[in-house]
Structure formats: C-alpha cells, structure tokens
Image: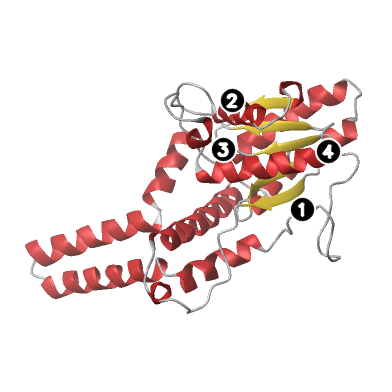
Amino acid sequence: MFLFTKLAGALLKPLSLIVIGLLVGLIVAAFTRWRRSGLTLIGVTTLALALISWWPVSNTLMAPLERVYMPVQVSAPDEAAWTLPRNVAAIVVLGGGAVDDPSLPLSAQLSATSLQRLIEGIRLWRLRPDALLVTSGALPRGRSQAEIAADLAVALGVPRARLRMLPTARNTAEEAAAYAELAGTLGADGDNAAGFRQPVVVSSASHLPRAIAEFRNQGLEPLAAPTAHRAMPERFALPSDFAPQADDLRTTEAAWHEFLGRLWARLRGQK
C-alpha cells in the first residue's frame, strides 16, 4: 500500500499530468485523423503549465492551507500568536526528504524543506531546552532522515541526550504512530507524561493540518508549529512577476500534494 500511494502521488503530480497530456496530444496529432483535437490538447496543457507556474495561481492554491495555524512567536505581538506552554516535553520535527551522501555536508543532505523544519525545531527547543527534540523520517537505504537531522542538530548545539529519533517512519501516518509509541514509553517513566502527550509538531505550514489530524488520531493533543511557508505576499513590481517560474510550479505541486493527501485520509476514514 505504501508503494502504491507513492506511485500514485508521483503520477498525479500536476507536472506529470501535463507531460502525459502533452504526449497524448502529440500522439493524437501525429498518428491519428484527429489532428486538430491533438493540437488543442497540446495548447490547453501548455497553457495549464504556464498558469500553475505563475505566482497568482500558486499562491491562491497554497495560502488557504498555510493560514490554518499561526507561527510560534517568542513573544506574542497579538492575541492570535502563541508561545510554548510550560509543560512541553517534546518537539517533533517531521521529515521532509533527505539523501544519505557522506560526501556532502550535513546541511546539504537534508532537503530544503527538511532543513527549514529542523531549524524551526531547534529554535523552539532553545525556548524549552529541557524538552526532547524528536527527529523523524526513513530512507530506503543508508542512514535515515531522522539520523541525518539528529546529527545536524548536534552539530548546531543540541545535546545528544536531548534527542530522540523515529527512523522507520515513512509517511505522516507512520510518524504519528511512531511518536505515540515513543510517548507511551517516555510517559511510563512518570516524567511529565502529560507533556509527552502534547508534543509540539513542526512541519511545513501547508502540511500541518493533515499532520495534526494524524497525531490526534493517535490520541495525542499536538500543538502546531508551522514553518517553510511558500505563499509569500507578492505584487506585480518586476518584469519577472509576469512570467512563470519553476519555484511557483513547486508551490503548486506542494499544494496539490496536500489536497491529494487529504483526499486519501478521507478515503482511509480519518476524521
């Protein structure tokens, strides 16, 4: 099932669908008598590619996902922001991709998304240095994302004793289940059991609504700490603002990934 969801996710990416549309249009135009229909399909998919690579479209898709939770502030400038509760016992940094390549520095082995999540997790840990910093994520071979992130956290000043890892979790549901098991073990020691049941979960702002739902399904009471925001305020100020950009295409794909994730969660019966 895990491989099926990964394969389906890859095939259903906007860019994958557009490439499929272009190939179908090319085949129809070149090898059938419906040449006009094939050319029309090529034109429509090309226009779709341009639109989803343009910031007004990508921001419109992403912004609603990222506005669900407020960032954690050191000092709340208004009533909408919040600070870390005193009983926080664990800060869980969800995985966002990595590569195990010893020839690269640790900071380059984590994806940009994973690096942003880890930096935010360390920032929050410095507000509660008595808490545990939990890294997460598996890789098909070699060291896990969790191990790579933990090594980088140590290099950035987090004591190894304050770290825990979830190295076998391959997706958000498995991360939540792995942390729930860890919380049960830590809570059994009688050391702030309630605090471990209420972890701070750090992830991309667009991913957090789905992640928080997975943690709640495990009977936990997670607190959301969003980071890695992509829907930034923009305006038509530069000539490049009128042109499609690869980074905006990635924003659209990230939003689409979350929409598919929510749909899959509903199909699985998640509340």
Q: Which residue is farthest bottom?
A: 236
Q: Which residue is mark 1?
A: 72
* Real-space Cα separation, disc 1 to disc 3, in angstroms: 24 Å
Does dot 4 land on a helix, a strand or a loop? Answer: loop
| Labels 2, 3: front one | 2
* Real-space Cα separation, disc 1 to disc 4, in angstroms: 13 Å
Residue 219 in view in this figure: no
Q: Which of disc 3 and disc 2 is earlier in sequence?
A: 2
| Labels 3, 4: front one | 4
* Nearer-the-camera pick, 212 or 142: 142
| Residue 147: mark in rendering | 2
Does dot 2 land on a helix, a strand or a loop? Answer: helix
Q: What's the amino acid at mark 1?
A: Val
| Residue 171: mark in rendering | 3
* Real-space Cα separation, disc 4 to disc 2, in angstroms: 22 Å
Q: What's the amino acid at mark 2?
A: Glu
Question: Which of the 4 image quarters holds residue 140?
Answer: top left
Who's the residue at 72% across and 26% down the image?
163
| Residue 128: mark in rendering | 4
Residue 194, image x and y in percent?
Answer: 89, 35
Q: Residues within 10 Å of mark 3 (few under 14, many from 20)?
A: some
Q: Which of disc 2 and disc 4 is earlier in sequence?
A: 4
